[in-house]
Image (tube, grey):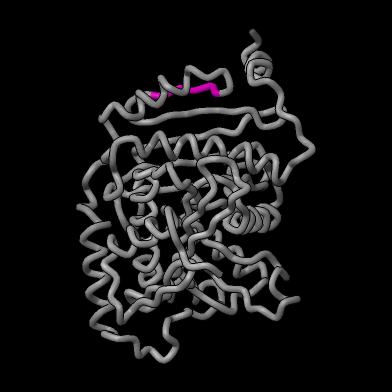
Amino acid sequence: MMPLQGAGLKVAEHLARRWQLDAARSRWRNDGFDWWPADYLVSVRIAHNPGAVPGRRWRATVDTRLAGGYPEGDVGQLSLDGYKRTFGTTHGWIVPPRGALRDAGGEPTLTFHSSIYFDDDEFLEDWLSLLACAGLFQPFSAQDHAAIVAGGTGSVPLRYPEDGQAAGGAEAAASFMLSAAEFFVPPMTAPSGWAGTGELAELTRYLSGSDRVFVQGDDTRVSAEVAFGDSTALLQILTELTHPAVGAGLGLRLRLPVELPSMDAIQLADRMNWEEATSWTGMAMMGNWVASDRAEDGLSGIDHVTFVPNALCWEGLAGNLALSMLARAEWVRRAFWPDIQDRPLSDILRDRFGR
């Protein structure tokens, strides 16, 4: 494999500078680097796909290995889905689908994952900053939740290195956690940094100019629908939500018009996370597909959820994430329901409102 160069090398070096990599706790590779700021291994990988569409020829991924020996039984999957819904933020919780690694003799692992796409002559500074912050949040979350998640799912925390003798040891891990907590965890009583800024109202006006989106919103929330077969997928952007670990921020939820038995929905959501993390989708991956208990008849829906803490609040980010979410609706429909054809949104709305 050729060493990184060009835009790929610039992105890797940018992340290394932002994270202030310690040579004693990191290792460079031809396609990125590994870093262990605390007890869990963070892997940055940069890949190039010359045949991809312009603007999407490079991909940067950040992964943190959390737990191994992940069981394939229903209890573990139910527990994991609950953790994803409760603690999910800007990274996906990725587990190989049942049997995916068995033929190769591999062991299923639970991994945090975030990714962005970029191009040689197109540096998207907001996405790169988001990846730097999301990637930093992964080892912070791993340190905080690994033992709880492993106990609830019947897996084993994957501390690195296995002998626990990394340079600095417990002192380095404690220093990292303190610094990360100061950045990510503002006063828990603080309101959302997006509420009242005008950004969501401006996003509503922007989306209303498209005949492919039905949108309503104000300065605190946005609701946008796009065609999904004979129905619509619903994107909700909310400022009143809070996260149990990082407080206020911005919540995004993409709700598909799908209802399945609970375990089928959980397994499909895991498959969606896996496919999005391992395929060249062209969309930044920030957040998770999860099963959601929203049906009165006991069936579960499937949502994609992202929560961005106030620490990552900057102008334009809500719009970028919203557009990525709407693109995700189209990608997942083509990837998982390829035989479904989208009706014109105008026809769907005419049937709904009777005009």
Magenta span dominant secondary structure: strand
* Quarter of the image where one finds residue 87: bottom left
Describe residue 342's horizontal placement relative to residue 306 as left or right: right
Report whether residue 134 is seen: no
* Spot occupied by residue 178 in the image (x, y as percentages of width and height): 22, 69
* Spot occupied by residue 25 in the image (x, y as percentages of width and height): 33, 79
Q: Write the start and end of the magenta stretch as one range.
A: 213-217
Task: Report the residue at 74% width, 42% height from top.
Answer: 337
Describe residue 270's horizontal placement relative to residue 98 as left or right: left
Task: Report the residue at 57% width, 57% height from top.
Answer: 277
State which quarter of the image contains the N terminus: bottom right
Report whether residue 282 is seen: yes
Q: Is residue 269 magenta-colored?
A: no
State which quarter of the image contains the C terminus: top right
Residue 50 lies, with reference to residue 203, above or below; the image says below
Describe residue 63's horizontal placement relative to residue 294 as left or right: left
